[in-house]
Amino acid sequence: MLLTFKTMGALRWVLVGLSVIVAIFLLVPVIFIVALSFGSSQWLAFPPPGWTLRWYQELLADPRWLASMLTSAKIAALTTICAVTLGLLTSFALVRGNFRGRETLRAAFLTPMILPVVVIGVALYAFFLRIGLNGTLTGFVIAHTILALPFAIIPISNALEAFDKSIEDAAIVCGASPWEARLRVTLPGIRHGLFAGAIFSFLLSWDEVVVAIFMASPTLQTLPVRIWGSLRQDLSPVIAAASALLVLLTICLMIVAALVQKGRQK
Amino acid sequence: MTNFKTTALAGVLASAALTPALAQDMVFTSWGGTTQDAQQKAWAEPLAESDGLNVLMDGPTDYGKLKAMVDSGNVSWDVVDVEMDFAIKAAEEGLLEPLDFDVIGRDDLDPRFTTDHAVGSFYYAFVIGYNKAVLGDNTPETWADLFDLEAFPGKRTFYKWSAPGVLEIALLADGVSAEDLYPLDLDRAFAKLDTIKDQIVWWGGGAQSQQLLASGEAPLGQFWNGRIFAVQQTGVDVGISWQDNLTTADALVVPKGAPNKDAAMKFLARASSPEGQAEMAALSGYAPTNLKSPELMDPEVAKTLPDAHEDTQIDLDVAWWAENRDMLADRWYAWQAE
Amino acid sequence: MTTATANPAADRSRMKGAALALPALLLLLGFFVAPVLSLLVQSVTEPSFGLQNYRELIATPTYATVFFNTFLVATLVTFFALVLGFPVAWALAVLPPRWAGVIFAVVLLSMWTNLLARTYAWMVLLQTTGVVNKSLMALGIIDTPLALINNLTGVTIGMVYIMLPFIILPMQATLRTIDPATLQAAALCGASRWQAFWRVLLPLALPGIASGGLIVFVMSLGYFVTPALLGGTSNMMLAELIAQLVQSLLRWGMGGAAAFVLLVITLALYAVQVRYLGAGRTAVGG
């Protein structure tokens, strides 16, 4: 009754109402950024005195913006692959394992989340300098994987805990090997957790600026590092234009994903 | 296993990404944004043409990163743009290379911004700025006006970080004369600041100060001179008062153990040359640190720069600040957090 | 083999289970624990050997204020994010797919937009002359602008905004795994809506609530960007202070000491949670 929409009665409208309010709260800054990207005021006055495409022209005229977006996407994708793979393995150990020190291990995997990123940034950078990983893509991905790992482990192990293990056991009884059962039964069963872990990992890397400043080099300038410099120095609405383009890209990807899903259902 | 595979994968991609790296001659690090773009145009690009020197741009400047590099002996920056008081402090801590003044011409450099370890990058002044659209004819002229809540009610904006500037302004506003500023009377300065503390909006970076001024969020305050001109140029009606403007400079330094020292000295020679400084000033709105630069400049541009206002100018004592940096920071942040 | 334990297959998989954590553990030991430890060690060696950094940390009221601010903000943010996030997660779990898809898309869209840009947008929205104040005044709801920025309100709004998706996603994942039949069973047994919520749904959802809450609380403790842009100087949080010490003043010893104290307090809180709420499972595992 509380988890079936049709039988929830008046409660469902309360839920819908609250969700819409929160959704508006989440949307307002995004819409605002898109609006500012067309505004003619350099100083983000709102409502803007006029409308212009100037910031988009500046954005497209400077190849460094596109280059930094690609660098960010590459690092974020690699970080996601590493963090989710490691996070999945670790989650199996933490949820299914039964060994001494498991609780301590859980806490240990959380520590990268607790420390302020500047501490991790400076410590890791000093370490990378000694072993020659500074300014390399490998070093960058390692740094972001460490930051992302707790964000992958938490939702994945959470989903794994909630997943009914007897379904996996049933598959084994029916003749599947344990790995086959995990791959074909358990993984689809915890896909929401995997998805959340992947999104968190990707976004953590995609938005991370403090550690990124330490890991950056002339050939590795991620989008947040560029935006950080630009925000402090110029506050150019080009940043709004870059963000707005990414919003557009996201919407396109979502529509494609929705269409693919629809096609499959047919 | 998977760990190994993914690391290996990352490694392969890393080497693929690194192979096309350019023939690197030196790395210059600054704060990013249009200032660094101007430095690239005024200094790096002419050097590429005249000497075939390839200057890679890195950034933003981060003192923690600089210290880590020097400590490890694996330095990847050759020239770095830093604040003047940091340059003095860093030289004392052994983080910087002494400069080669056989390559860099020292004679024409403004001695206020030149040390054995640093040459001025650009120089600027803290001035009083105000938004005419908000204040009308009632405009602030002196630092004391910024502390006058009756004549100028509402928010005013000051520089957020512990750095030369705000404490001096408070003392000047309280009637201390320019000659008697140093050593700063901190109790008196903080007491003066307390009188307007709840009306202060702090700006952490140049862009934020412009946004506060242009939007009228804080229609008056303390600004970097170059920032006011940039706002004026976008058509916003803002005014400036040069009364008791406070000057200091950004400095160019070479970290200890920089891999391309010779190239770095060449770069500094160009950056501090009359032409290099004149071009930088024209592009950025900051003043040249080479005394011969103004005569190379368009007089219309030159008259908007701080060196046209030396009659009412006060030099910030960066050496005193460098000496007391930690103590001042402790007091500053403790007072801010109160 | 078969005689050793009652269930050898299960036993073997348990041992394997422990080994599965090894790759991540090695990565963490090599590239996190070792480097961070060497920085923390500097807290007792820089500027000279001894505990003077810790003594200064305790003796200086500023640090106590900053620690207090940090935990206050983290608590406020976690509370509001949970209160606002729970209904959305619930709605996502029960709404017809089409509607849920729209709300889900909004959540993802906001997450995807650059964090710095979003935070800056809040700055312009919330300032005295900003859109929010102007709209409220135009509507006649307020006469004088509200102070929404450069104070606790600003940090809380900005951070709740950033953290909401981190609460919503794990919570809806947990809620989706709950079998609606459980609640129907509760209804058949005579439970009222209210009882079913408090005694059945909420306990079942607790793992998701705890894990989302934990993510947000811990993330907030070390957060830098939003407090730096939306907070006032009297709400300075620890990450900003440590950034000052490490990046601007080069006092790594002091920065290390502050970081170490934060780490110890947080892990102690975590241990308390594990012990008294039995939350080792609920917190991370579910």
Image (cartoon, coloured by chain):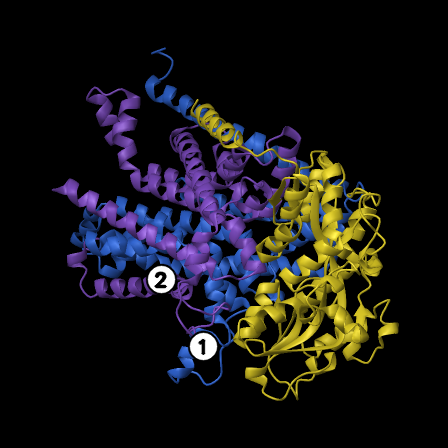
Chain colours: A purple, B yellow, C blue
Asked if residue A66 lies left or right of residue C98, the reply is right
Closer to us: A61 or B254 = A61
Numbered circle sitting on residue B95: none
Name the residue type under label 1. Answer: Asn
Q: Is residue A141 in view?
A: yes
- Percent from the top left, x then y, of residue C207? 37, 46
In the image, A78 versus C235, the foreground residue is A78
How busy is the neighbourhood of tag 2: few (under 14 within 10 Å), some, or many (20 plus)? Answer: some
Neighbor class of circle 1 (other Cα within 10 Å; few <14, some 14-19, many 20+) is: many
In the rendered image, residues at marks 2 and 1 fall on the same chain: no
Residue drawn at point x = 76 percent, y = 47 percent = B269
SS label for mark 2: helix
Identify which residue is drawn at 82% across, 63% down.
Answer: B317
Q: Amino acid at mark 2?
A: Leu
Query: Which quarter of the figure has residue A82?
Result: top left
Q: Which residue is mark 1?
A: C133
Q: Which residue is mark 2?
A: A27
Tag 1 secondary structure: helix
Residue B164 seen in the current view: no
Vertical comparison of A131 with B250: above or below: above
Which chain does the residue under circle 1 lie in? C
Q: Quick check: B230 above or below B40?
A: below
Callout 2 touching callout 1 (CB < 8 Å): no
